[in-house]
Amino acid sequence: MPGLFPDQTSSDSAPITAHCDGGARGNPGPAGYGAVVTDASGHKLAELSEFLGFKTNNFAEYSGLLGVLAWALEHGHTTLKVISDSELMVKQIQGKYKVNSPDLRPLWEEARKRIAHLEKFEIAHALRHKNKDADRLANEAMDRGMGKTPTPAAGSSAKPAPPARKTLRGFVRNGTIHLLDDATLPDGVFVKVTTE
């Protein structure tokens, strides 16, 4: 079984690079991750973006790494370089920092399991401005989860539509709001409550 950072071996799998990012608005708060996967020539292979619910920033960063590892393994890529602006996560995966958080430990362990299935793996830290596309996708995931319309890309003339507003009915019991008619809202959505 290969180690965490196996020596370079000959492989038919072409190397791929993934820029990943995660964030939470409020930390903890509505969280999401984004990632851009490219081949050795820089051609985009995939964009990943997922809303995670009400989580911490570090949870979101690890979720981005796990998402990239899952995508690589599912698509038969065994040589992967990950670039992230989370210094904590990068150094924990590299073994330079200990994983003391009980919330992050299972994510770190799962990442190590997935990495062990690769022939070659590298992870590097980059400053946020070098991770713009992944950051954009993470923010789009948070916007989706919060019911917001993403802001159009720079240079786009389209105006964003106002967020869809719903009027839901419910009642309060023991300080908790219960919605009627089986209505549900995704985690992280902010609401305005008025009494009748």
Image (tube, rainbow, N blue to C red):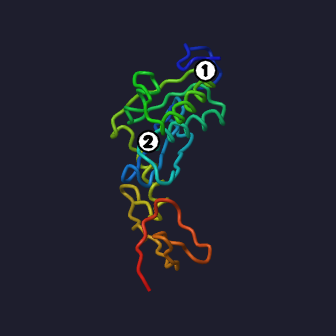
Q: Residue 8 occupies which quadrant of the picture?
A: top right
Q: Secondary structure at mark 1?
A: loop
Tell me residue 59's x, y (percent): 46, 42
- Mark identifier at residue 21: 2
- 98 to 2, vertically: above or below: below
- 16 to 172, vertically: above or below: above
Residue at the spot 41% in from the left edge and 26% down from the top edge? 91
Mark closer to the chain start, 1 or 2: 2
Tell me residue 122's x, y (percent): 49, 24
Residue at the spot 52% in from the left edge and 78% down from the top edge? 170
Residue at the spot 52% in from the left edge and 49% down from the top edge? 49
What amino acid type should be assigned to the residue bearing mark 2? Asp
Tell me residue 139's x, y (percent): 42, 52
- 96 to 22, vertically: above or below: above
**Mark 1, other Cα within 10 Å: few <14 / some 14–19 / many ≥20:** many
Q: Secondary structure at mark 2?
A: strand
